[in-house]
Image: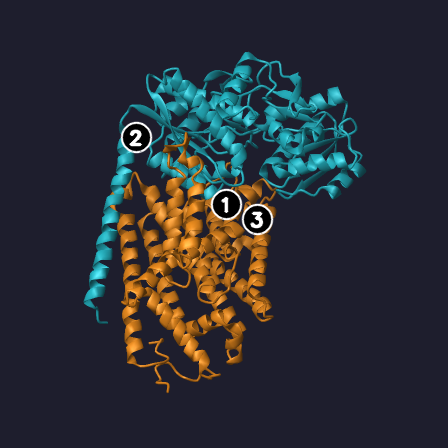
Amino acid sequence: MAIKRRNFLRGSATAIGALTIGQAAPFYFARNIAKAQDGDTIKVGILHSLSGTIAIIETSLHNAELLAIEEINAAGGVNGKMIEPVIEDAQSLVQVFAEKAKKLLLNDKVTAVMGCYTSASRQSVLPVFEEYNGVLLYPTLYEAQECSKNVFYTGAVPNQQLDEFEPWIVANLGRKKCYMIGSNYIYPKETNREWKALLEISGAENMGEEYAPLGHTEFSTVLNNIANSGADYVFSTLVGDSIVAFYKQFKQSGFTAEDIPICTPITTEQETAAMGAENAVGHYTSFNYFQTVDSPENKSFVERYKAKYGANEVTNAVMEAAYFQTYFLAQGIAKSGTDADALIYEGLPGQEFNAPQGPVKIDEKNHHTHLWARIGKAREDGQFDIVWKSKERIRPDPWVDQLYPNKDCDFTNQSVLDRLKKPWSEEKNRSGTMDI
Amino acid sequence: MAINLAGGGATVRKVRRARLIPLWALILGALVMALIGTSPHYAGTDSYVVGLIGKFLCFAIFALSVDLIWGFAGILSLGQAVYFGIGAYMVALSMKLNYTLENATRYGGNIPDFMEWNGLTEVPGFMAPLLSTPVAVALALAIPTLLAFIFGVITFKRHIYGVYCAVITLAEALILERFIVEYQAYTGGFNGITDYSNLRGAPFLWVIIAVTVVCFLGARVLTHSRIGTVLKSIRDNDVRAEFMGYNVANYRIFVFCISAFMAAGAGAMYAAWVGIVSFLDTGPLLSVEAVIWTAVGGRATIIGPFIGAFLIRGLEFVLSGLDIELAGRSIAEYWQIFMGALFIAVVLWIPDGIVGTIGNWVRKRGTGTLGQIREDQDRLAHDRQHDWDPAGATKPGEERV
């Protein structure tokens, strides 16, 4: 094929241009690395979805973390260094979570990352954190049965929300006939497994169990089933838009909170506001934190949050965890420095902080968090009256005894530590789980 | 060659000369990718860049598959991710099954974690063939192609096209997405499939680059063949093409299957490269994104989808982590405004997309390149429609009077 001079020139120009880009690009990235290596600041990744379907809740976590960083820096930083947040938007897409995590660890060389919200997003970044030995602080309540070396879980696991809740329902509401409704995915299924075990212990009855597709908003059949089942309360693990639809239709079809209360470990102030508080009145939620918690720490937290982000903002439990985990991280770095293994084994375990919900602590063995249990009754203004509070904070148990008597998670156990010391190429199991 | 259906030598020469440029660009592009991919700059600390390049290449092939049916045959599909996603899920399932055989899951078992928490105790029999990699790859390619064929037969044969066809493809994507989320014991549901290791680094990157080059060359050959010419005439006036005796439905089914095959291949490589698949990879969101990449890059051009996919995905990646404060907030918190502005700008000012517009501009200067080739093609197709030639009797290369 004949090559015309003009084309040859044009092609060559393109080639030179492309090569220039190819060669220049490394400098862009190299600059970032240089920035990371000058030790004036401590880089911390903030990895939440600021756009996409779960942006509303995740933006509030992002905000809470930035608020805490601002406060820590205003008080002089950590060991004289400022914390520099590296913000990424994960766009509610699991692949983006994974690639951003990789970027934060490899390119920005952050000391730790605070981020993720759904279990899906956490599971998508797990392999990245485990392979490159990063540190992730994860603020959401979740279904447990996980115990990664590289993750610190600051949200509640089922035993912290359920173990006291079920006996409380039996003792105080006098109800022993439960109907379970949940969204069809991992969290509700795992939570209900434990709930059923609890029902059995207290001799309560399981009147039915049903799963609606995620995002489902039409519940007339379900409500019919509930009415026919003879249940005297509903245990709901619906999430997202389904919560709002279910509570509304529940009221519309004539159920009242006095006849059949809805008890749930998920519905927060955020949802009661979205559904219109009159639909939630009288129903119960079990959580570690409510905006109405009566403590000076919480009052000041709510005030500072509103001052920064607007008077109409409400606080919720996940965001409170996002807030106090930032302090955990700062204290951990102050204790052990920024090396990942030092943080994982010395810095973070055992950290305590006076959080808005009360004093909280990271468990030395399983790297989950000791949290308070509370039961709230929704009232007319969308907030919750706290009708019960645990006497002490509750130890997290990622492998609950009722379901997994033979498993435990222990990062102080020598055989576990020996396994985790092996390089990634030899041993891909980074879990602290072991058989007992 | 395939194009010289009509006219004197001048046109032929012009067309052939024009064709050199995109070929050049293609080979160059591949070289640059390879250079970046294997450059020591990125080898260690920056390997996420290599990850992105492999991923974008898969997206580029996927966008090309959209361009083939939309740009060259006028079939707007809002569900092309169905074929991409099925390809991806087959490979991901296969890799996950094999990975869990060797590495215990967090439950300690040797079946995928999503099966375990859904109460399955062993891998269901119908999934056993996926344990073999060649079978999985074959299925990843064959199932989407077969689906596309069935879809083609039940829509195109009934003269369903245009906006109705687009709506049906959209429904198709929604159905598959829902299916995957609901049948979580077999698909991982909302969480998708992750933690199955992935193929990374140079060897597989070369495979992706090679497949990309083959796909783009293949698309070029196809669209410049006699079939391509007929497809374009169908795109421009399907009734007339029908009257000329072409079996419009069969041509549409054919290109739809080719496109699905390509999308499936892209999906399969994507799953192996990225190491995560999710229901979002099968749904309307990704489908529409591919349409946008194609539109921005330039529909009915070969390298348009490639440029569109790289440009938009690259911009998104950079902007969504751009921590520069503007108006008191970090750009990462509202970067999508900029992307929106870009899309509006493209639609308003360069509706032919980047490559199409450059082509038009070059053509105006009378040097005959990208735009020219399109123009020539369209004119040829047009001429052909005017000459009554029902059976397409003129063989390539024959002089027509």
The spot of residue B191 in percent (x, y) is: 53, 42
Q: Give the CA separation, mark 2 to mark 3.
A: 43 Å
Indicate whether B392 appears above or below B281: below
Residue at 55%, 23% in the rendered image: A311
- Residue name at image x 70 percent, y 26 percent: A201
Whichever of labels 3 and 1 marks the residue nearer the N terminus, that label is 3
Chain at numbered mark 2? A
| Residue designated by label 3 | B186
Q: Could you tell me which residue is drawn at 39 percent across and 43 percent down? A: B317
Q: Position of residue A155 (x, y in %)?
A: 53, 26
**How many marks are shown on the rendered structure?**
3
Q: Residue at x 50, y 45 (%)?
A: B193
Which residue is outermost to the bottom?
Answer: B401
> What is the chain letter for disc 1?
B
Residue B193 is marked as 1
For residue A383, above or below residue B224? above
Q: Is residue B132 above or below residue B397?
A: above
Q: CA distance from mark 3 to mark 1?
A: 10 Å
Q: Is residue A389 visible?
A: yes
Amino acid tagged 1: Ile
Image position, residue B383 (x, y; %): 41, 78
**Could you tell me the amino acid type at mark 2?**
Ala
The residue singled out by tag 2 in the image is A36
Q: Nearer the viewer, residue B312 or A311?
A: A311
Chain identifier, colour cyan: A
